[in-house]
Each structure stands twice: as structure tokens, then as C-alpha cells.
Image (cartoon, helix red, strand yellow):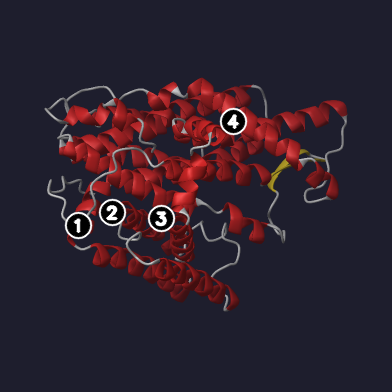
Amino acid sequence: MTIVQAPRAVSTTAPPRASRDTGIDFLRALCVLGVVLLHAIMVGVTVGESGPVFDNASDGTAWIAPLSWFLQVMPLFFVIGGFSGLLAYQRMRQRGGTAIGFVAGRVHRLLRPAIFTIAVIGLALALLTVSGVPADLIATAGFRYGQPLWFLGVFLLCQALLPLLAASHERAPLRTIGALAVAAIAVDVLRAASGLEGLGFLNLAFVWMTLQQLGFFLADGSIDRLSRGIRAAAGGAALLTLVVTFAFGIYSPDLIANINPPTAALLLVGVAHTSLLSLHRERLERFSRRPRVAAFTGFVTVRTMTIYLWHMPVLLLMAGFTAVFALMTGMTLPALDSAGWWAGRPLWLATAVALTALVAVAFTRFESQPAPPATSSRRRLVVGTLSGLVGIVLLLALGTSVATALIAIALIAVSLRLSSLSSAPGASQSASPAARLVPA
């Protein structure tokens, strides 16, 4: 991985906006809420003869496919990440900041709350172990916790490469996004032709970087300069192509299934989402300025990563408490996907959102505090970023256990140390209040 400083002259992009786009911020907040709701509704808890059983409630159901069309928001999230990231990087460059300062700030914004969360989870798993909880239940909890961490690793990679990709966008915007999209499609073709499912995980880079790159076109005004008819046609064509791929069995109509590993179907979803966003952006921004909407947006904006990192531990705690309560009282839990199960979903979802919000309030400081000023170099930053990525990948590949949590904590600590912001002139801009308010 190479982190470079792009030229200071900006020739193909529009000047950075003077103020935040509240409509985009509101849409990002909705995406975060959508992720919490999706994961919450997929949690299934029952009690069998051998004890508690924790399952994915959506497995083998008919409702997950249509629901995924509303709650599969990750493509849009990466488009927004590209939009916000490019504008933040441009503002930093105008103030004299560097690519090193930008990436270091992103590393701290993403990994500082993560190291605390992983430490708490590791401690919780250790306490469960000494308390005599069956090893298979502990392993399930560690696996469920680690699943959403793919986003942290991929988003960190995309943001670390943003200065390099931004420079490429300035030189050749269409060739850059075209090359990334072709690479994503090629991975799908090779995966299908060879039968090697592992090849699909290459798209953890290509699919999400393509969608981030699409956000650059939204940020520099290229999409807004197109006529409304062209934008609507692009969105419609993407949606039609998506339906055709479903009809011919190329991709699953369950958009959640297209995320592990990611497929090029998500690129079509991203184009359709971006088309809708561009067509309704002014209306969205007006709506986002309403007091209650703005309050919701403001709450989530400064806690985006904290909410994402803590919503799964909250759900695991809710699932464990439900199982323990059922065992202690003899209460019969409704079968998954039954009428009784669905009747309890509104209360379950509301509780998940409320508890996640409370936890986020308690731990926001780990996300919002400025990165410590120190000396850094490009080489140290590259090594530090890779160290953090390896720590996250470790939890994904081997599962979260006491041992893997300790190793991941050590690797992320090294990442934060090596990625400390430079005290060189101009680099401190990345730790300014304005930069800190840019959500990861």
C-alpha cells in the first residue's frame, strides 16, 4: 500500500463546500440506523433441550430478500464516505495539510474507539470463560461480534488510500473508476468460472473502492452537472440490470447475500442509490434542517463509529439476557419467524436502538477526541495502517476470543502509535476541530 500526497493544484474538482451538507449527513445517519435495525432483526434466540440457541433469524426465510432492498445501505454508505472524505481532504490541503496528516487522522478516528471496544469484549469473553459458560456459546458470541468488523477494516483501507485515489481521480476520473469496476466484475467472473469462493474476497477492496470513487463524482459536482433525465436513466438502467441478473441467477435477489463476499451487484445498487440521492438532494437538505431531524443527525454524526462498534455487543447482551431469563423463569420463547416472534420485534428493535444510543453516549469520547500530536513519516504511517488492518483481519479470520482480542489490541496499539499525527508545519490541521467533525 502506498500513501502519497496529491498535487496541491485541483484542476478537475470543484472547490470544497464552505459548510457541511446536512442532507448527506442525515442520509449517513439513516444508513447507520438501518445497519442497527438490520442486525437487530436478524438476531434469533431460542432455548432447546441442551440450552440456549443463538441463530440468524433470517436464514431460510422469504422476508429477508425484500427487506434487504430497503436495509442494504452499505453501497450508499461508501458513496457518502467518498463524498465526505474527498471534501475533507480538499479542505485540509487548502489549509496546508498533507496526505499523511489526513490518513493519520482517519486511522485514529476509526481505530481509537475500536481498541476500547475490543478490549471490553475480550474481558467479557474471559469472564464468561471463568464463569463456566459453555465454550461453544462463547465461540458463537465471539464470532457474531467479529462479523461486522469487516466494515471497519475495509473502510480503513479505503480511507487510507483516499489521497492516492483522489490524485488518480483528478488525472483520469473515468479511467480510474472504470478500472476498479472492471476489476470487481472480473473477480466475480473468475469466482464463478473456477468455483473458488475465496476469490470473491478480493472484492472487499475492488467493490468498496469503486463505490467510494463514485462518491468523488458526487463531491466534485460531475453528477450534478448531468441533466436530471440522464441521472434518472442511469439509476433506472442500474436497477433494471440488477433485476436481470437476479432473473438469470447471476446474483442473489437477497442483497445481504451479496455482501459476503461482496459482488458487483452492489455496484449497481450504489449507482441506483446515487441517482436517487442526486435527484432529490435539495429536497433532502431542506428536510434535514428541521429541528428534530437535525438533532437526530447531530447525535449520530459525532458517534458514527461508536454506534457501529457497539451495536453488536448490545445485541449479544440482549440475546444473552433473554436466554438467561427464559431459563430462570421457564418461559417459552417463540419460535423464530412465528407470529409470536414477529409480535415482539417492535419492542426488540426499539430496545436495541435505545440501548445502543445510551452506550454510544457513554463512549463517544474515544471517537471524538483529537489525535495526539507527534512525529510521523510516510513509512511509519504505512506500517501503522497495515498493523491496524492485520489486527482487524485477525478477528475476522480466526474469530474473536480472548487470545485474538489481545493480539488485535496490541496490533492496533502499534497502529495508533506509528500513525500519530505529524507535528510538522501544516500537518496539525488534520487535528483541527473542523477536521475532527468530519465523520469517518
Q: Are marks 1 and 2 in contact (CB under 8 Å)?
A: yes
Q: For the residues marked 3 and 1, what is the alpha-carbon distance in whole angstroms?
A: 28 Å
Q: Of 21 and 49, which appears nearest the observer?
A: 21
Pointer 2 residue: 220
Residue 12's disc number: 1
Q: For the residues marked 4 and 2, what is the alpha-carbon distance in whole angstroms?
A: 35 Å
Residue 356's disc number: 4
Task: Left or right? Give the position of 66 relative to 17.
Answer: right
Q: Choose the circle earlier in sequence order: 3 or 2.
A: 3
What type is the residue that disc 2 sits on?
Answer: Asp
Where is 322 relative to 127, above or below? below
| Viewport quadrant of the C terminus | top left
Task: Give the quadrant of residue 34.
Answer: top right
Q: For the residues marked 1 and 2, what is the alpha-carbon distance in whole angstroms?
A: 8 Å
Q: Choose the circle earlier in sequence order: 1 or 4.
A: 1
Q: Choose the circle earlier in sequence order: 1 or 2.
A: 1
Q: For the residues marked 3 and 4, what is the alpha-carbon distance in whole angstroms?
A: 27 Å
SS of the residue at dot 3? Answer: helix
SS of the residue at dot 2? Answer: loop
Q: For the residues marked 3 and 2, what is the alpha-carbon distance in whole angstroms?
A: 25 Å
Q: Of 169 and 236, which appears nearest the observer?
A: 236
Pointer 3 residue: 204
Q: Of 396 and 98, which appears nearest the observer?
A: 98
SS of the residue at dot 1? Answer: loop
Q: Are marks 1 and 4 in contact (CB under 8 Å)?
A: no
Q: Choose the circle earlier in sequence order: 3 or 1.
A: 1
Residue 105, position in %: x, y? 28, 33
User: For the residues carrying marks 3 and 1, which lies nearer the camera in this image?
Assistant: 1
